[in-house]
Image: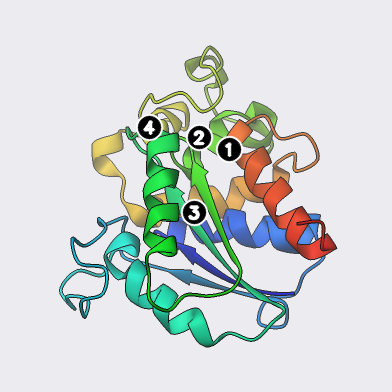
């Protein structure tokens, strides 16, 4: 099984790569490729139209990307990882499935997964991983939240690391992900959406679809 993985941005890549390499012993460019985009974007009104090159978000480009992947051979699968943000995750997934089903051309194998609220929520649900990566982290700032709560996850993570959110950018989020991801518990994830992502990958790589 070869996996083509679409994410919203570069800050999602370290966690996804860690899951595939550490949890499943997959090798990048041999068993999978990760394709980050420039943000989330939104699904176009006409999914069959040529995408607007000014809009480079994952959802902006998704219909065209999926049509392009229609020529993937058997043994390949496309994985789409998108943040729920404040959107109901069931509604978001339903809209993605509806898009896929109504495309004129599409890949044979597709897996949609939602990070609830965002991939930083995966880190907040694993305070041991944060503490291992950042010994100075103020864990009591994030220890009272339910996993996958819609709380402004990356902003809460920034505060726990002693940073002001307004002073942080995508580069900071990528650094945090690179340092925390190696310590994530991928056997019993604290985040339900991380667990769903891991379980979905497991079904693909083991053939138990």
Q: Residue at x 51, y 16 (%)?
A: 145
Q: What residue is shown with label 3? A: 175
Tell me how far mark 1 sits from mark 2, CA to CA: 9 Å
Which of labels 4 and 1 is toward the front? 4
Looking at the rendered image, the disc whose residue lies closer to the viewer, 3 or 4, is 4
Quadrant hosting residue 86? top left
Quadrant, the N terminus:
bottom right
Residue 121 numbered mark, or none: 2
Q: Which residue is mark 1?
A: 193
**Element type at mark 4:** loop
Is 147 placed left or right of 82 in the picture?
right
Q: Is residue 133 visible?
A: no
- Residue 150 on image: x %, y %: 39, 26
Question: Would you place residue 180 above or below residue 110 in this image?
Answer: above
How far apart, in angstroms, are the residues tagged by discs 3 and 2? 15 Å
**Is residue 104 shown to the viewer in this render?**
yes
Mark 2 residue crowding within 10 angstroms, few (<14) / some (14–19) / many (20+): many
Q: Residues within 10 Å of mark 1 (few under 14, many from 20)?
A: many
Could you tell whether 5 is left or right of 151 in the image? right
Question: Quadrant of the image for the C terminus?
Answer: bottom right
Q: Position of residue 52 (x, y in %)?
A: 17, 75
Circle nearer the viewer, 2 or 4: 4
């Amino acid at each position: 099984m070869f996996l083509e993985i679409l994410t919203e941005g570069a800050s999602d890549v370290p966690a996804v790569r860690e899951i595939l390499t550490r949890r499943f012993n997959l090798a990048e460019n041999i068993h999978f490729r990760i394709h980050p985009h420039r943000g989330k974007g939104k699904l176009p009104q006409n999914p069959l139209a040529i995408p607007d090159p000014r809009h480079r978000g994952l959802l902006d480009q998704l219909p065209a990307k999926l049509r392009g992947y229609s020529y993937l051979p058997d043994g390949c699968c496309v994985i789409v990882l998108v943040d729920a943000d404040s959107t109901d995750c069931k509604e978001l997934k339903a809209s993605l499935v509806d898009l896929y089903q109504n495309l004129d051309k599409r890949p044979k194998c597709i897996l949609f997964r939602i990070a609830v609220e965002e991939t930083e929520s995966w880190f907040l649900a694993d305070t041991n991983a944060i503490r291992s990566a950042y010994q100075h982290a103020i864990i009591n700032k994030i220890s009272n939240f339910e996993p996958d709560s819609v709380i402004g996850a990356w902003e809460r993570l920034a505060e726990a690391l002693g940073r002001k959110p307004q002073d942080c950018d995508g580069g900071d989020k990528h650094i945090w992900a690179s340092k925390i991801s190696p310590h994530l518990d991928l056997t019993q994830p604290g985040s339900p959406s991380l667990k769903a992502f891991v379980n979905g990958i497991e079904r693909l790589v083991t053939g138990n679809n």
